Image: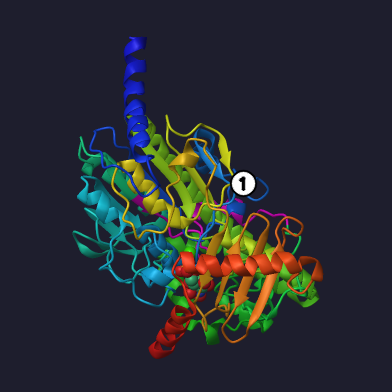
């Protein structure tokens, strides 16, 4: 009996390991197609704007995420994973195509995604995988290569959201978005999955995206909690360049009082604070308008007292006290939305285990980018600075990845497509730019990327983060803000992990600076980015206006 169980466990692992040894011959792009029944399933879980600081496997000071952490305990935690362009739809386009933004063309949230391009789900589908996508895509068009999808239109709504369904067109569902996306994913795994075919499911949460609306069941706990402040909450941006000083993502200065901090419009009016009725009349009304009467009553039970207390305290609050209050409000709501994500991930992992599917399933947990949780006084992302450049990444694959392992290589979202194709034994197209992570899964770290390339474009736009490209190595970061201004910044990531001091003009860094300039130019050539392309995208953005 025992022997048989061991054998059943050993067979998929053996097949996988045979397949991988085939795929590892030559470079990472030369995966030998293999059609054994041992091909692994892939469950790709991604949340929207989920900072690594808000996953307890990375940092246990803000929130406990026991279910997401299970992926780290049973697999590998990447401590230096990053994105190539820290914004939603561009990140998704990089993930699907395996190409940098300047080549896949989805440089910002505004440009449409060119659906004539090849993506890894289409290649997996062609190779016999059953494929499905549930949740946020944010492309403005439907995905290709999926047997089934239900996606949110645009950003989607937290309460009683609409979905675009492959089979039924536009549908409206009652409930909380995170729970609905989890239910869809589970339902598909339980009732639509075809026996004998490997699957690839993309389970994509909207949470914890702005405007951070938690599930009603999490309001009692999260609206009552107090969170530790980051050291740089009161950053004045001295020591940085123009871009950090002019960005509009400061919690105190740039959040809306009703929309973000959830003041009731009456309180906002009484205190004279609110710009919301002027600046965001539709946004606030539309998201609060989604709640039905009973949901609204429950919501008000927790947010009304917060508003009333604030109205009383406001006259005696200093600027610092106001910032502190707003930071706490921000964390209560942002982290509150993550509680439902963690529960959802737990339900899906439980099902994989109960059904035995877990043994041959690669599970990935990541975010479309990092996010500021008050570091430098900020919310949002976009910059190549640490908290938005880095992204959480946890991967488990029983029999291949050693449980509880930690990897500090500079992996990027660019690497998912070649990794999944490689794992499935599908040839990786030569024009994909990422690297397969499979050698890293197996503990090999030699010859992996020693410098990451970054390029952000969405400007002029909301949050006013200027266009920039950069090279990031283990020790340094050289950034060029090239539009509107022409400024360079250099950070010593080891000596100054909080990136408070630009040392570009420090003579002690003259050699480092010269070397990084050369390496950055070489990276631009390697990845086929150029001054001409920078100009092309500037002109394209202008033409859109
Ligand atoms: C919305 C948010 C922004 C956010 C972008 C992009 N504003 O426009 O704060 O940066 O999405 O986010 S809101 O007033 O509409 O909430 S992304 O994750 O989709 O790239
Ligand atoms: Ca996002």
Q: Is residue 501 visible?
A: no
Q: Nearer the viewer, residue 338 or 515?
A: 515
Residue that appears at 28% across and 43% down? 199
Residue that appears at 71% across and 64% down? 512
Locate the N terminus by quadrant.
top left
Above or below residue 416? Residue 380 is below
| Residue 485 in which image quadrant | bottom right
**Magenta segment:** 202-228
**Numbered disc 1: secondary structure:** loop
Q: Could you tell me residue 294's position as x and y percent?
A: 43, 61
Q: Could you tell me residue 58's position as x and y percent?
A: 61, 46
Main SS of the magenta part reads: loop
Residue that appears at 37% across and 40% down? 25
Q: Could you tell me residue 493's position as x and y percent?
A: 70, 58
Tag 1 residue: 58
Above or below residue 301? Residue 449 is above
């Amino acid at each position: 009996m025992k022997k048989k169980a061991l054998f059943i466990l050993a067979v998929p692992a053996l097949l996988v390991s045979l397949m991988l040894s085939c795929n590892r011959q030559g470079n990472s792009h030369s995966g030998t197609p293999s059609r054994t029944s041992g091909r692994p399933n892939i469950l790709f879980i991604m949340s929207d704007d989920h900072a690594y600081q808000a996953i307890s496997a990375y940092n246990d000071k803000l929130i406990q995420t026991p279910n997401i952490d299970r992926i780290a305990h049973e697999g590998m935690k990447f401590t230096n994973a990053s994105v190539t362009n820290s914004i939603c739809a561009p990140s998704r386009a990089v993930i699907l195509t395996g190409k940098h933004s300047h080549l896949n063309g989805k440089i910002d949230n505004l440009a449409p995604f060119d659906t004539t391009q090849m993506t890894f789900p289409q290649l997996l589908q062609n190779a016999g995988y059953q494929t499905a996508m549930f949740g946020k895509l944010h492309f403005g068009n439907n995905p290709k290569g999926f047997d089934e999808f239900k996606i949110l239109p645009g950003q989607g709504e937290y309460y009683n959201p609409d979905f675009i369904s492959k089979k039924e067109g536009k549908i409206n569902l009652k409930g909380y978005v995170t729970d609905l996306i989890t239910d869809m994913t589970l339902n598909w795994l339980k009732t639509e999955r075809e026996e004998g075919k490997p699957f690839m499911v993309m389970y994509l949460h909207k949470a914890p995206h702005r405007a951070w609306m938690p599930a009603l069941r999490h309001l009692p706990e999260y609206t009552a909690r107090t969170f530790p402040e980051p050291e740089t909450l009161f950053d004045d941006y001295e020591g940085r360049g123009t871009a950090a000083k002019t960005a509009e993502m400061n919690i105190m200065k740039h959040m809306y009082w009703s929309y973000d901090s959830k003041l009731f419009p009456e309180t906002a009016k009484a205190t004279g604070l609110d710009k919301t009725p002027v600046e965001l009349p539709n946004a606030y009304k539309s998201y609060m308008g989604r709640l039905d009467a009973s949901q609204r009553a429950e919501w008000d039970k927790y947010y009304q007292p917060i508003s009333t207390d604030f109205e009383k305290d406001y006259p005696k609050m200093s600027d610092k006290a106001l910032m502190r209050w707003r930071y706490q409000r921000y964390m209560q709501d942002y982290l509150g939305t993550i509680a439902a994500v963690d529960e959802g991930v737990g339900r899906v992992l439980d099902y994989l285990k109960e059904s035995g599917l877990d043994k041959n399933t690669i599970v990935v947990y990541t975010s479309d980018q990092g996010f500021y949780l008050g570091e430098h006084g900020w919310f949002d992302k976009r910059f190549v600075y640490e908290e938005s450049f880095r992204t959480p990444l946890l991967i488990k694959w029983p029999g291949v990845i050693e449980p509880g392992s930690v990897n500090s290589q500079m992996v990027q979202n660019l690497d998912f497509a070649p990794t999944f194709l490689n794992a499935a034994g599908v040839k990786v197209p030569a024009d994909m730019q990422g690297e397969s992570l499979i050698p890293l899964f197996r503990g090999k770290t030699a010859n992996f990327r020693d410098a990451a390339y970054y390029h952000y474009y969405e400007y002029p736009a909301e949050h006013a983060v200027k266009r920039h490209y950069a090279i990031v190595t283990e020790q340094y970061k050289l950034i060029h803000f090239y539009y509107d201004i022409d400024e360079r910044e250099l950070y010593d990531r080891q000596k100054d992990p909080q990136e408070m001091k630009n040392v570009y003009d420090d003579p002690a860094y003259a050699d480092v600076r010269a070397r990084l300039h050369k390496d950055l130019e070489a990276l631009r050539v390697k990845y086929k980015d150029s001054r001409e392309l920078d100009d092309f995208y500037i002109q394209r953005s202008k033409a859109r206006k």
